[in-house]
Structures are given as structure tokens and as C-alpha cells.
Image (tube, grey):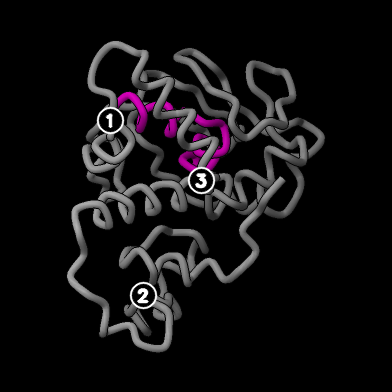
């Protein structure tokens, strides 16, 4: 399977926005967007005025990179969202938010979506008491997400117990028990990333 292996900070600089790919580093002065907020390359300031297509493409790339997806997988979410009732853009973002790796990140158990994906891949996370190692697993209202009992003494989870976690309002999380619950479907205003999803829909619908 293809995988991005270059510097994560280059992605934020390329999209001109913080994608929070490096956890706490993104909130510090070491963040690349704080130190050098220009497009990577030899001549970052000589780019021409972006066309409508380029604006749409950059928005799609930004969302793909924020959630850590490749093109085929991301386009699959668009197609699924298009088949659902309601606004396609909002449906797509809701599906992305309901990925298990994103839920683990939202509950504060992973410093970034990438580290949360690793926790899921390594079998540390359970859904309704059953181990799930598929990051794209789609959670539903009422699902209980927890850390596998024999993994709770690992350093990352011990640190979570000592941290005050502010989870999105569609999630409940008890850091003492390392257990969370999906209490509602994510709504558009629950997503804190600066996303203009209509640009992505316009790009894919051409």
C-alpha cells in the first residue's frame, strides 16, 4: 500500500494551513507554519494567481492530508456521501469524522490522527468490547470505544488519564476509564478544521 513518508510539516506549508499532523508540536513555536509559512520549493513567491481548478484541488488535498487518506479512499467517501440524503459535502465530512482513528484522536488518546491510526492498527482499541484494528472502521451512535484492558498501563494511555481532554460534543470520554461513547452523529459545526467542502464537491462533480 502506498504511504506518504516525507516530512509532515511540508504538507502544512504546501496547503498554507495548520493540519495538526504533529500533535503538540503544531501548538508550539517549533511549528513549521510559525517559523516558515511559505510554500516549499526554491521560488515560493513567484507562483501565478491560482485558477478555479487549482483552488478546488488545493482544498481537496488539504482535507485528504488532514485525515491521512490517499486519493482512492478519499474519493470513495465522496461517492458514499453522494448516495446519502442531505448535502453531499456535509455528509462526506461526517463520514470522515466517524472513522475510528479520528474518534480516537478526538478523545485525546492519540496526539495526532497518525498516532491514533497507529494505536488502532496495533490492536489497542476496542469497539463495543471487541478489538478493532481497522482505522477506517465507521462508528455509529451508541458505540463504546475503549482501550484494550491489557494495554491500559502503556505510557501513552497513562498520560491520557492525567490530562484534561475536551472531546467534541458528539463524543463522551472518561479519561479515568479510558472509555468513550458516540452520543450523536457529528454535525458541520463540530468540525474545527477550516474546510470549504463545496470546493471539493465542485471538483469531483465536473
Q: Give the mark, 2 or 3, whose residue is nearer the N terminus.
A: 2
Point 36% across, 47% down: residue: 60
Element type where label 3 sits in the image? loop
- Which one is in front, 202 or 148? 202
- Which one is in front, 151 or 50? 50
Q: Give the range drawn in magenta.
A: 90-107
Q: From the viewer's perspective, is residue 184 above or below residue 206? A: above
Give the left or right position of residue 109, taking residue 88 as reference. right
Give the left or right position of residue 79, taking residue 57 as reference. right
User: Is 149 a magenta residue?
Assistant: no
Q: From the viewer's perspective, is residue 46 above or below residue 66? A: below
The majority secondary structure of the magenta stretch comes to helix
* Residue 89 marker: 1
Element type where label 2 sits in the image? helix
Q: Quadrant of residue 198?
A: top left
Point 42% across, 78% down: residue: 40
- Residue annotated with mark 3: 108
- Residue annotated with mark 2: 33
Point 39% across, 29% down: residue: 78
Q: Gap in Å between the C-alphas at discs 1 and 3?
A: 26 Å
Q: In which quarter of the image is the C terminus?
A: top left
Question: Residue 59 appears at what percent x and percent y?
Answer: 31, 51
Of all residues, the one furthest to the right in this rendering is 150
Amino acid at each position: 500500500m502506498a504511504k506518504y513518508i516525507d516530512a509532515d510539516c511540508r504538507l502544512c506549508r504546501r496547503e498554507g494551513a495548520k493540519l495538526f499532523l504533529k500533535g503538540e508540536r503544531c501548538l508550539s513555536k517549533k511549528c513549521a507554519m510559525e517559523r516558515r509559512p511559505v510554500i516549499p520549493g526554491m521560488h515560493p513567491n513567484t507562483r501565478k494567481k491560482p485558477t478555479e481548478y487549482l483552488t478546488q484541488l488545493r482544498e481537496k488535498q488539504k482535507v485528504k492530508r488532514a485525515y491521512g487518506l490517499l486519493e482512492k479512499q478519499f474519493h470513495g467517501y465522496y461517492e458514499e456521501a453522494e448516495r446519502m440524503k442531505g448535502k453531499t459535502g456535509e455528509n462526506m465530512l461526517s463520514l470522515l469524522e466517524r472513522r475510528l482513528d479520528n474518534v480516537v484522536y478526538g478523545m485525546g488518546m492519540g496526539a495526532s490522527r497518525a498516532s491514533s491510526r497507529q494505536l488502532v492498527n496495533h490492536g489497542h482499541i476496542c469497539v463495543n468490547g471487541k478489538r478493532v484494528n481497522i482505522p477506517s472502521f465507521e462508528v455509529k451512535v451508541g458505540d463504546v470505544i475503549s482501550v484494550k484492558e491489557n494495554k491500559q498501563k502503556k505510557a501513552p494511555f497513562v498520560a491520557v488519564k492525567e490530562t484534561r481532554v475536551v472531546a467534541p460534543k458528539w463524543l463522551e470520554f472518561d479519561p479515568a476509564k479510558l472509555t468513550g461513547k458516540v452520543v450523536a452523529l457529528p454535525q458541520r459545526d463540530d468540525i474545527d478544521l477550516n474546510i470549504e467542502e463545496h470546493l471539493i464537491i465542485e471538483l469531483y462533480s465536473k
